Structures are given as structure tokens and as C-alpha cells.
Image: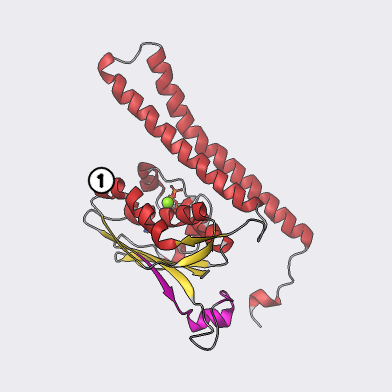
Amino acid sequence: MSDASSKASPSRNERLAWAENLRREFTANVSHEMKTPLQVISGYAELMANGLVPPDDMRKFAGLIYEEAQAMRALINDVLVLSHLDETAPGAETRNPVNLASVAERVVHRLEAPAREAQVVVELSADPVEVLGNETLLEQMIYNLVENAVRYNEEGGTVRVSVRAERPQADQCERGTLGKGCGDTEEESPGEAVIRVADTGPGIPVAAQEKIFERFYRLDKSRSKETGGTGLGLAIVKHAALYHNGEVSLESEEGRGTTFTVRLPLA
Ligand SMILES: Nc1ncnc2c1ncn2[C@@H]1O[C@H](COP(=O)(O)OP(=O)(O)OP(=O)(O)O)[C@@H](O)[C@H]1O
Ligand SMILES: [Mg+2]
């Protein structure tokens, strides 16, 4: 018997205490992450208001304030998305047919400017694949994956985004992670929607591959700070995949890039 299965399952009280702890930690992290941009904003604004910024530097200071305000806005948006997902019971919301190819096209279009600036080429190959779900959330999910693939890439790097309908892999049918689409014959199997985002960046060490889905976890805090990340993107990706009865996985080799794969039941 494995370790995990021989342990007694946690009691209801233990589960509640654990959830409460997570919530407290999340609130503390959010407050901490908000403090830094707010301090910068109020500090620069105070200097400007007191006439301590030479006229030639006004634009630069306004630009810095704007950047920090944008970072704060992104953080608040992410926190709102996660809170909404935390509060939403499975099956509580209406799900609509969503064409993932159109969503992926929109995401790639939205990221054209940052990709150009990072000198990263983004390639998209998408079949018209439909799932049932929340279009905004699916867009946020794909956006976060492609944004990371651009952000944590190298100059001259490539990002390949693909959207396909595929037959589920045998091991997923056995594990029951994707109940639908696991029929014996081609006719029985509606299959699954598979979104892949592959980059040619530095890769993610095996030891960090599970942790990166945790809220506020960043691999390289100094680099993330430089690029403005707060560590919520992949937590949203994971929750969004679960919300759609799917899953997200990754394959990565240090120095050779990373491929994230999201599998969702087809509509
Ligand atoms: N494609 C990737 N290649 C290498 N490292 C990655 C990749 N995607 C994510 N990471 C690492 O995982 C960490 C967590 O990613 P996540 O998207 O959750 O947060 P973030 O990008 O730092 O901030 P946010 O997405 O909230 O703006 C990142 O800080 C980065 O270190
Ligand atoms: Mg991110």
C-alpha cells in the first residue's frame, strides 16, 4: 500500500482549517503585492505635487506611475478572477459553446506588441475546436500561457500555439481524468480539445514543475519583478482548466523550452 493511501483522510475540521489557512495566506500575499506599486505611485506623485521633479523629468515620472498603476490593475484583475473561481460551485454557471481557435487567434493578436518587443515570434495553428464553457475564462487561460511563453523566452525565440481535437490518451482514460471521450471506438469518442503552447525559453526545473501552479509562486523572483509578474497566471490556468473539467500539464527540459498542454472535453 502506498503512503498516501495508508494515511487516514483528513477530517472535515482539518479540511476547513487548511482552506482557512490558504485563504489567510492569499490575503496576506495580495496585500503585500499591492503595497509595493502603491508606495511607488504615492512616492512619485508626492514628489511631483511638491514641485520636486524638474520639468524635463515630468514625463518620465508620469510614465513610471502609469507602469505601476498598470501592474496593480493586472494584479487586481487576477485576484478577482481567482476569487470568482473559488466561489463558483461546479456546474453553477451556464456554459456556452466556445470556438477555441477564435479565442487563440484573439490572444495571439493581443500579444503581438509584447512579442515584437521581446523579439519572439508567435506561430498559431488552430483547428475550429469547440468546448462548452466560459469564453472570458478560456481567453484568460490561453492568454496567461502565451504571455508566459513570450515573457520567459529568449530574444529570437519562438512560441508555437496549437489548438486541435484529439483522441484522449489511454492513460488518461484509465486514470479517469477525462471521463468523456474515452469510448472504445472512433464513433463513441467525441475526443478532447487540446491546446499546446510550446516555447524555446530556458525551461522549468523538474523540482519546480508542480510549484509553479501555486498562487504567487515565481521561479526567479528578480526576473519576474523586472517583467512585472506576480505569480498568479498559472494558478488561473489550472483553475480554469479544472472549471472546464479538464487538466493542464507541462513538459520541460532545462535550456530547451517548455510545452504546456491543456486538455478539455469537447462540446
Ligand atoms: N513558459 C515558461 N518558461 C519558463 N518559466 C515559466 C514559464 N511559464 C511560467 N514560468 C515560471 O513560472 C512562474 C509562475 O508563472 P505565473 O504565470 O503563474 O506567474 P508570473 O508570470 O510570474 O506572473 P503573472 O502571470 O501573475 O503576471 C513564473 O514566474 C516563471 O518563473
Ligand atoms: Mg504569467
Tell which of 98 and 67 is nearer to you: 98
Looking at the image, which residue is at 40% across and 71% down? 164
Looking at the image, which residue is at 46% across and 23% down? 42
Is residue 100 visible in the rendered image? The answer is yes
Is residue 219 visible in the rendered image? The answer is no
Report crowding for label 1: few under 14, some 14 to 19, many 20 or more residues within 10 A (C-alpha). Answer: few
Which stretch appears magenta? 162-180
Q: Which residue is mark 1?
A: 117
Q: Residue 232 vs residue 255: left or right?
A: right
In terms of secondary structure, where does tag 1 sit?
helix
Q: Position of residue 12 (x, y in %)?
A: 78, 61
Above or below, 210 against 71 in this view is below
Q: Is residue 172 magenta?
A: yes
**Residue lying furthest top in this view?**
51
Q: Position of residue 61 (x, y in %)?
A: 33, 24
Q: Amino acid at mark 1?
A: Glu
Q: Position of residue 119 (x, y in %)?
A: 23, 51
Quarter of the image containing the N terminus?
bottom right
Tell which of 142 and 71 is nearer to you: 142
Looking at the image, which residue is at 44% across and 26% down? 41
